[in-house]
């Protein structure tokens, strides 16, 4: 047992009382806050950084996956709703790429992080969401099985936020864990999807680089075979951003000394992971400078934090599984869909597993039950900490599904408050109807949206 000290009890100022409070401003939190505020709910979004976007900006991801699905051999954008509004705003700022094909099977869409941050501010502003930046959620005060208040640490000291419904979009299930909801961590055997330190290079000659995203993995294999290099993983993703002189580099992999993944919940491991991540980024850069077109490149950005793919997965009424993803499962309580395949970041490699293409419809539905935790009455969760198995999470953790889940919990919070009930007991048909009316695609009997 580590040594402990006793902190004296103290009075905490009440920052505010809200109808809905959302912890975390990644894709799930953005969509949740917009959906709740759009329904007329006084909504607060709390974020530890000074900008929105979650891993998409804070970890430098710069690429949306899961907006599209390969439906019987044809690509469709299956995540709409709030995501469409956000994408249009990023596009108006000139920060959105055209969708690009991955592995010849599925589309992703790159964006500029500055445009994402500005567009997300605008989107939340347009819907009158209150935002509290630079506030780290740090604990809860419970009233039986309800959360009475969320504690946040700010430069002005500790403050409390009260709300009728709380939504955990922290990615790590922080709020759910403090409230006592059950959760699993990673593969339940001490590891999880491996984190990566992203980087972006500038100063590339786009003509000369051509489609180097194809040749770089081959050059890496040759370098390993020749014994000149070792790399932390296979399957590097190096692709151009909107301006072809800038490329994103997803190349690194962070392990502990025993070979298991760095744990995003452990401060000492995160500290080591950040430093080792930057070291690996420099190594990746030195290799990439040898690729034609990259000779004059330089590292233009290392993001604010190490990219964390998986930590806690909160246990809800249903856990979305790998079989659900590969089998394109349907659910009566569907609130949205996931078209991204399983993408498992395992030791030294990245393994993709797709539903049958072109024989299947290429997406699974997402049941409302995966957003409602066990044991806590006024809490919902969305995003990568929603109720999924380790395998299911390797697919539905990407931005597209997180937007869809977020939009659903925001609307569900409104219905719970309107019906004076708890989120677990709302009429799901009403939620489905609301989502459809607001432009979301939830699967079921809806026709699949056309186009990219
Ligand atoms: C290296 C890497 C590459 C990836 N590549 C892609 C890709 O190409 N395309 C894609 O779509 N997805 C990709 N992903 C996955 C995707 O980025 C995430 O799974 C997705 O962002 C999850 O969304 P979220 O809203 O659930 O959580 P997050 O994006 O993690 O957002 C959570 C937010 O909550 C905040 N927060 C957390 N805890 C607290 C707290 N206690 N108090 C206050 N705020 C808090 C965080 O600062 C963050 O802003 C990648 C992930 C990584 C790590």
Image (spheres, rainbow, N blue to C red):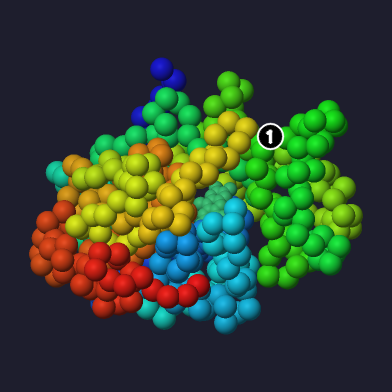
Of residues 132 and 435, the one nearer the viewer is 435
Give coordinates of residue 380: x percent, y percent: 26, 54
Side of 162 where 423 appears, left or right: left
Helix, strand or loop status at disc 1: loop
User: Can residue 21 be seen?
Assistant: no
Dot 1 crowding, Cα within 10 Å, few <14, some 14–19, many 20+:
some
Of residues 313 and 350, the one nearer the viewer is 350
Q: Residue at x 84, y 67 (%)?
A: 207
Looking at the rendered image, the quarter that the N terminus falls into is top left
Give coordinates of residue 31: x percent, y percent: 38, 66
Please tell me in which quadrant of the rendered image residue 165 appears: bottom left
Of residues 168 and 95, the one nearer the viewer is 95
Give coordinates of residue 203: x percent, y percent: 83, 63
Q: How many marks?
A: 1
Q: Residue at x 73, y 35 (%)?
A: 231
Give coordinates of residue 436: x percent, y percent: 27, 74
User: Can residue 440 be seen?
Assistant: yes
Q: Residue at x 45, y 68 (%)?
A: 76
Please tell me in which quadrant of the rendered image residue 367 appears: bottom left
Outermost residue, front side: 359
Question: Pointer 1: what residue?
Answer: 232
Q: Residue at x 26, y 54 (%)?
A: 330
Outermost residue, top side: 1
Q: Is residue 35 above or below residue 389?
A: below
Side of 154 where 181 appears, left or right: left
Q: Is residue 181 above or below residue 51?
A: above
Of residues 104 and 295, the one nearer the viewer is 104
């Amino acid at each position: 047992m580590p040594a402990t000290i006793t902190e004296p009890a103290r009075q905490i100022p009440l920052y505010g009382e809200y109808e809905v409070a959302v912890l975390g401003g990644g894709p799930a939190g953005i969509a949740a806050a917009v959906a709740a505020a759009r329904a007329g709910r006084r909504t607060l979004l709390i974020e530890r950084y000074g900008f929105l976007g979650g891993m998409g900006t804070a970890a430098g991801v710069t690429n949306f996956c899961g907006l599209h699905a390969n439906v019987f051999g044809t690509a469709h954008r299956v995540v709409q709703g709030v995501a469409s509004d956000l994408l249009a705003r990023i596009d108006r700022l000139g920060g959105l790429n055209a969708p690009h094909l991955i592995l010849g099977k599925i589309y992703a869409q790159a964006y500029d992080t500055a445009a994402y941050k500005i567009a997300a501010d605008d989107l939340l502003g347009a819907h009158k969401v209150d935002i509290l930046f630079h506030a780290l959620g740090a604990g809860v005060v419970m009233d039986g099985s309800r959360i009475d208040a969320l504690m946040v640490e700010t430069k002005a000291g500790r403050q409390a936020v009260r709300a009728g419904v709380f939504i955990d979009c922290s990615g790590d299930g922080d709020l759910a864990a403090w409230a006592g909801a059950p959760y699993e961590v990673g593969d339940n055997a001490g590891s999880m999807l491996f984190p990566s330190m992203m980087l972006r290079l500038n100063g590339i000659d786009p003509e000369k680089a051509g489609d180097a995203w194809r040749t770089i993995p081959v050059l890496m294999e040759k370098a390993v075979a020749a014994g000149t290099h070792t790399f932390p993983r296979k399957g590097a993703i190096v692709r151009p951003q909107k301006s072809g002189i800038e490329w994103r580099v997803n190349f690194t992999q962070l392990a502990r000394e025993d070979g298991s993944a760095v744990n995003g919940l452990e401060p000492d491991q995160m500290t080591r992971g950040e430093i080792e991540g930057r070291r690996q980024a420099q190594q990746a850069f030195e290799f990439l400078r040898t690729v034609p077109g990259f000779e004059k490149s330089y590292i233009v950005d290392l993001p604010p934090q190490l990219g964390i793919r998986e930590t806690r997965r909160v246990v809800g009424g249903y856990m979305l599984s790998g079989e659900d993803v590969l089998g394109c499962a349907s659910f009566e309580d569907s609130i949205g869909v996931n078209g991204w395949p399983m993408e498992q970041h395992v030791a030294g490699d990245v393994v993709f597993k797709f539903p049958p293409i072109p024989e299947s419809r290429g997406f699974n539905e997402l049941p409302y039950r995966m957003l409602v935790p066990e044991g806590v009455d006024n809490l919902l969760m969305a995003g990568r900490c929603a109720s999924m198995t380790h395998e299911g999470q390797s697919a539905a953790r990407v931005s597209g599904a997180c937007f869809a889940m977020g939009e659903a919990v925001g609307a569900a919070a409104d219905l719970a408050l309107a019906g004076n009930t708890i989120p677990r007991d709302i009429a799901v048909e009403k939620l489905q109807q609301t989502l459809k009316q607001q432009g979301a695609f939830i699967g079921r009997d809806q026709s699949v949206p056309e186009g990219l």
